[in-house]
Amino acid sequence: MGSKSGGNNFPGVARPFGMVKLGPDLYDAKSDAYSGYLSTGNFSGFSLMHEQGTGGAPKYGTVAQLPLVRKSIKDLLSNLTVGRSGDDQAELGYYKAKTGEGVSVELGASEHAGIYRYGFPEGSSQGNHVLVDVSHVLPSFRGQGLGQGYKGGNISVFADGHYEGSGVYDNGWNISPDWTIYFCGYFDTTITRNKTYVGTDEDGSVEQPSGTASSTSTSKRVGAVFSFDKSEVTSRVGISWISTAKACRNVQDEIPAKTNLDTVVQNTKSEWNTKVLNKITTTNTNDTSLQLLYTSLYFMHLIPTNQTGENPNWTSNEPYYQDIFTFWDLFRCTTSLLQILQPTAYEEQIRSLIDIYRYEGYLPDARSSNYNGRTQGGSNADNILADAYVKGVRGAVNWEDGYKAMLKDAEVTPANEPVDSMAPDSSTKEGRGALPDWKALGYITPKYSRAVTRAVEYSCNDFGLHQVASGLGKADDAEKYLNRSRNWRNHFNSNQTSLGFKGFVVPRNSSGFIETDPLNDSGYWGDPYYEASSWAYTWAAVHDMKHIIELMGGRQTVLNRLDTMFTPGADGSDSGMIFDPTNEPMFNIPYLYHYISRPDLSTQRSRRIAKEKYSTGKSGLPGNSDAGAMQSWLLWNMIGLYPITGQTTFLIHAPWFESLTVDLGGGKTLEVTATGGDKDGDGEKVYVQGLRVNGERWRRSWVDWRDVFESGGRLEFELGSRAVNWTDGRVPPSPAS
């Protein structure tokens, strides 16, 4: 699901939140392989480190092996690739590919180690080899200056044939400085010979008789080749951010010598079933629906990476998670779903965020290779901390420190280092780079890139501070940030029109508003709007929805305006819609009908998107998975609720299944049942006719966290084919209005 057509899902092998994500790296000299995989191209390696479902630019593709069949190899360290033969195969915990040289490659993984099983052609007169090229990374071809760089490394082969070393790399999507990963590899098959090399473009690959090769130069590559006379070869490799000794311990502890690949695969399946897939159960038997449900659960649990005990930057007793890619994508749907599915891990992730602030000065909006970056809009970790706080995450979380971290985002402008060539005006590493305008003016002028996006997101961030300050008894701060959360209004131009509708958030300066073209103003890093248009961002301040509706002209106008966003051809094309299901800024929009007392239309619009834009195929996602953001939107649609981040509100629409149970941990469950529907939610019987919550008749179009999640709960839906007014007409809260 979603490995092609921009979904960029990682199809290889991993454990939930595991550090190792072992999979194929494909190369076609023109396409960015964001998660390593491409449907075309040649294999450049099978590496242990990948991200999940991202766009922007590739990250990792490091610590790789590549099987080769040939009598002689003239230049091993020249970015060799091997053709592919047939389609790759994958199932939970297992991946298999076949190279054009006839080698089968089977993969398995634990948390910090991977296992390879190679099947070389029987009776071949060619040599059977495995290449380890330390310089291997995933390249980028987009010309944005975000391509990863190899900066040097070392590799040593020991008398028993095992190898150890490290590689140094930089850049990637988060523009990170040098980072080092350590590795330790073993072969459980007798090695007939091995050779270690240093390679340059000028001199080719030169053997190092000592068995050790090292480099501190981008142009000087290092690696080794191992040769075998057996057709089946097994290799086990561990990685660590700390040392080669730790990498060796990781592989020996998790995949000891002579461990069978099948054992690793079964252990991985068991872990996924126990920790993730059993969290949601259903009586449904439709294969397509079940594949969508459980595949979506899988892909939203690959990152962030649990690196507790593997933090190279500081020593702490707190958990440590990284590979956050990114909160700009995840704060609307994914983090709130992780809280109910993985309460223990989620508390650890909140503690980790606060610890990153303690030692590095800012919360991350994104983070990889142990380095913050990049921040696309606001400081959206603030939204996530606020959401966790109002929904009762306590445990070992130090909320005074958490609030200090949020205050730092809200009050201290981060240094503009490193300067981002795509947005050189202010920091994209962390924090809120446009704070000087926001604090002094209450709006953001065009001297800052992404000014409108930042303004509406800073408003949401400030609402998050209001929520936490209120809970901590900081009344003055609570009032201050509630007022600041309304400053998105300073970008609202009631005279800006599009398709007959008036009122959009627009760029502005000290002289007033700047006209825009709402149908065509979606932009990128250097533009006023980031990856969505003013048609999208005008709805963004959901904490102030009542006021948005008033500014737009009332409920009927808002109804017409929302309907227009879903009207084919309204965007000026033959059949396209203004609503864009491919990116996160519009995630909320199908559900905003709730705020004008039309939850039936929220159900209709969101269900149609879910059924038409998502499928089980390789092109089954409407856009980048973005670490599971797309999948978590779909999962909420299946459950029949939609979260409003930073509030305890969940909007009610309609579930897909007759029966669904969510394990909330601690012996608590959310049970969702539906009668009168279409079993799989595929037909017309999707409208709520009536609802009972915990046995009581329910007339509101939303539930609160305390109603069904805090201690568990039960939702009993009656569905039908006709939209009826089952609510009492009240609309969900708008705390800032």
Image: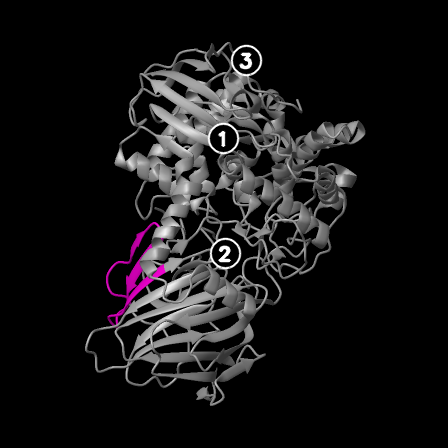
In the rendered structure, which disc, 2 or 1, sits on the residue that comes first in sequence? 2
Q: Amino acid at mark 1?
A: Ile
Name the residue at 57% across, 60% down. Answer: 369
- Closer to the eye: label 1 or 3: 3
Q: Which element type, helix, strand or loop, lies under badge 1?
A: helix
Height in image: 429 above or below 168?
Answer: above
Query: Mark 1 and mark 3: span between their CA atoms?
Result: 19 Å
Closer to the observer: label 2 or label 1? Answer: 2
Mark-to-mark CA distance, 2 and 1: 35 Å
Disc 2 or disc 3, which is closer to the eye? 2
Q: Nearer the viewer, residue 152 or 662?
A: 662
**Amino acid under disc 2:** Met
Q: Say if residue 566 shows up in the picture.
A: no
Q: Residue at x 21, y 79 (%)?
A: 124
Q: Amino acid at mark 3?
A: Arg
Q: How are the residues colored?
A: one colour
Q: Nearer the viewer, residue 48 or 269?
A: 269
Q: Which mark is residue 730?
A: 3
Q: Are marks 2 and 3 in contact (CB under 8 Å)?
A: no
For label 1, the residue is: 589
Q: Is residue 359 left or right of residue 19?
A: right
Q: Which residue is mark 2?
A: 19
Mark closer to the chain start, 1 or 3:
1
Tags 1 and 3 touching, CB below 8 Å: no
Residue numbers of the magenta segment:
84-107
Categorize mark 1 by other alpha carbons within 10 Å: few (<14), some (14-19), many (20+): many
Instruction: Give how far across and how far down residue 278 sits, in percent.
Output: 39, 37
